[in-house]
Image (cartoon, rainbow, N blue to C red):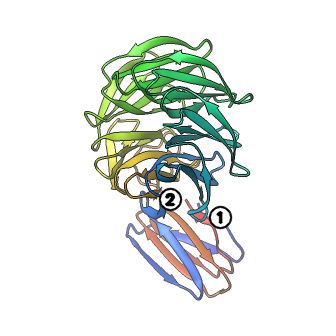
Amino acid sequence: MLEPTSRLTSFALSMGLGIVLAFSGPSMIAWSEPDHILTTIPVGAMPMGVAVKPDGQYVYVTVLSNDSVAVIESATNTVIANVGVGDNPNFVAVSPNGQLAYVSNLTSDTVSVINTATNLVTHTIAVGDAPRQIAFSPDGSRAYVGNQLGDTVSVIDTGANSVTATIAAGDGPYGLAITPDGSLMYVGNLNGNTVTVIQTSNNSVIATIPSIPFPTGVSVSPDGTRVYVASTTPDSVRVIATATNTVTATTSVGAAPYGVAVSPSGNEIVVANYSSASISFISTATNAVTRTISVGNNPQQVAYNPAGTRVYVSNYDSSSVSVIASPVQASGQQSGASAPEVATLAKTGNPDFLIFALTGLGLLFAGGITLLGRRVL
């Protein structure tokens, strides 16, 4: 929708074309169609993990080359801080309340705790051997870390900043995710070609799902009924039904998929194809790829913003993060269907302002605007 501003008049004409015309004095207009790469942000060599703060204002990216976390301001798509952490930071996760960012340091065997208000490390927690993915319980009281070389998952009490339990998992736990109710954790065992299911109430293994080759990224649907697991070989995403803990579908994607994320609506997922320099979007209704977009070299991890309008992609060998404008899909909308364009429009100082924004949905005319600084979604 287009939010009203002072002296704003607008109308829409269904045209089904695709063009943008802009006439104005001193102004700035930036726009994008669905799935358009809005910008590419340099962050330093070998970026890997990526996480978005729950309010969407900041994005956190681990940078292996200089043992730091780059903090990106989403409004400006610029790096505003670099936070030094442990050796070879891999993954990052932000607490549900947005106050803390946890970072796994692969060769330090530690987790760095960053205060997101100050961008300072407040604690360093010793965990298992070669920590990888991190996930928080829904209430934020616990953080779980998969230790790839230790074949374990460390359970961290976030109030005490200490490990309270260590759970034996499969061979090489890499990616993990928690169901929305916090009752179950799914752990992808990279070396064992399995997924371990852990009951969080007593930290016990209740199931092992076999025959999932080289599982890396793991993500759970918002309703908790499905788990999506990226398999780097044979280039696919497996769908697990949580009711039965069985694989119900397999979707072929690009080469060597790593990170996977479910959209906030639950209607699609995005996966980073490491060896294809692309990301694939998959409809959760059909388990079919709806579109593929080229990004930087060797994309590692992906994350949605809370509104589902942006996807952030860490490009490991391009030293950058790609920012993708993604269609907004309300619950129940068919994934891959047309959605309103995503654009950011800014105008100052000149009342003689005219914008024609023509998309597949229609022609939008807006005139007589003193100040326009709203997002079209």
Q: Nearer the viewer, mark 2 or mark 1?
A: 2
- Give the residue displayed 46% in from the left and 40% down from the top: 261
Helix, strand or loop at label 1? It is loop
Q: Earlier in the sequence, mark 2 or mark 1?
A: 1
The reply, left or right, for residue 199 in relation to residue 191 is right
Of residues 54 and 205, the one nearer the viewer is: 205
Helix, strand or loop at label 2? It is loop
Three-letter code for the amino acid on which mark 1 is drawn: Glu
> Label 2, on which residue?
43
Picture coordinates of residue 256 (x, y %)? Answer: 30, 41
Three-letter code for the amino acid on which mark 2 is drawn: Val
**In the displayed image of the protein, which residue is found farthest to the left?**
234
- Give the residue displayed 40% in from the left and 46% down from the top: 300
Picture coordinates of residue 11 (x, y %)? Answer: 56, 71
> Label 1, on which residue?
3
72 over 160 or under it: above or below: below
